[in-house]
Image (cartoon, rainbow, N blue to C red):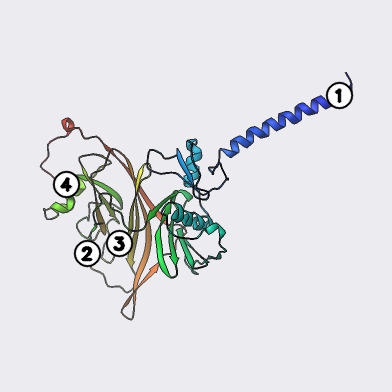
Amino acid sequence: MDRKLVTSIILLVIVGSAAAYFLVLSSVSSDSEIACPKDGSPYVLTPIGSRSENFNWRCLQCDYCWRKTYPEDVYQRWRKAFLEPPFVRDYTLLYLRKVLQLNISDPLLMNWAGGKKTPTGLVGCEVYVYRAEDIVVSIKYPVVLPENTIYEITVEVRGATLWEGNLYRRQFVTSIPTPPVGAEFRAVYDYYGGVGLFEKGTHIIATSMDPLDFATVSDYWTLLKEKETLKASTEDFISIIISRGDYPTGGYTTQVKSFSWLETYPTTFLFAVNFTDPGEGVIVTEAFTNPLVLVPIGNLSVGKYVVEVHIYRFILTYDAGKAVYTPVQTPVVEVWKESFEVIEDDETNRAPSSQP
């Protein structure tokens, strides 16, 4: 056989093999990023927390809908990925247009100005502000691991707030506190009852009734401590206690800044909490304290749950009699996490109890 012909055949085989190889790589790569199969847009959503999660998809750019279950590792990477502020801006406005049906311009056709506006000296947090036409989009997020990033977003039109909420792991949540049981958000603060009982951290409490209904009983906080658990039943009334632990003096406070119930899996109770310490010269009580907050939740369905507390610290001082709260500069925002489970109630295995 002619040597040139043999060489040509070998080259064709090599080229063909390489083409096949890169074709395989291309198919793998295309499956490593979730995007609209019609126009390649990355602005896509799936109904997180429902049975259609990672199955029914919608493109917020062209409104194309498709059904596909992506590999779990691909899907989780998509949910936990860090999103650049310009993407968050456009993603949010497309969500408002397509999902909430608000009358707002297409962000992809607008000429945006602005960018990073983080105040000098502010550590552990980034702030971005964008403007176009009569719209202003403000984005703020803590410097944490990508999967813990909560984007606080405000959209203003002609100087009035059109929408305010959070974007967390590809799920939009309105900032208005949303109690799971549909009632008004409630929180009970205490500074002395938990001394010697609740260590610093998050505590899950399971009682037979709303703990606010028996708040006048003696040894109230001791009773709640006895009801702490990580495995409750559907018959239990779930409450969450966030405690700073014991301090030798007063002056230390806790304040829930926001609370959201995210229909993720597992379901997430998301808190933003301010911790304030007394600064130099601030007069405090000479008594042991345990700054804590009790948040009644209610009866929950079977499943796994996560409590995630994002903590923001401040120092309190006074200037000419006026309170001044100075943020504590930290490289990352402190995040507390606790997991618990709710199982089916089994009356045959529940010991009778006279306690709430």
Q: Residue at x 16, y 30 (%)?
A: 348
262 left or right, relative to 348: right
Q: Residue at x 47, y 42 (%)?
A: 57
**Disc number at residue 287?**
2
CA–CA distance in space, label 1 to label 4: 87 Å
216 left or right, relative to 105: left
**Disc number at residue 5?**
1
Task: Give the mark nearest the N terminus, 2 or 1.
Answer: 1
Task: Give the mark nearest the N terminus, 2 or 3.
Answer: 3
Q: Which quadrant would the C terminus be assigned to in this image?
A: top left
The image shows residue 324, relative to residue 90, as above or below, that is below
Can you identify the residue that label 3 sits on? 255
The image shows residue 273, relative to residue 8, as above or below, that is below
CA–CA distance in space, label 1 to label 3: 81 Å
The image shows residue 177, relative to residue 286, as above or below, that is above
Which dot, 1 or 4, sits closer to the camera?
Answer: 1
From where the camera sits, is residue 317 visible?
Answer: yes
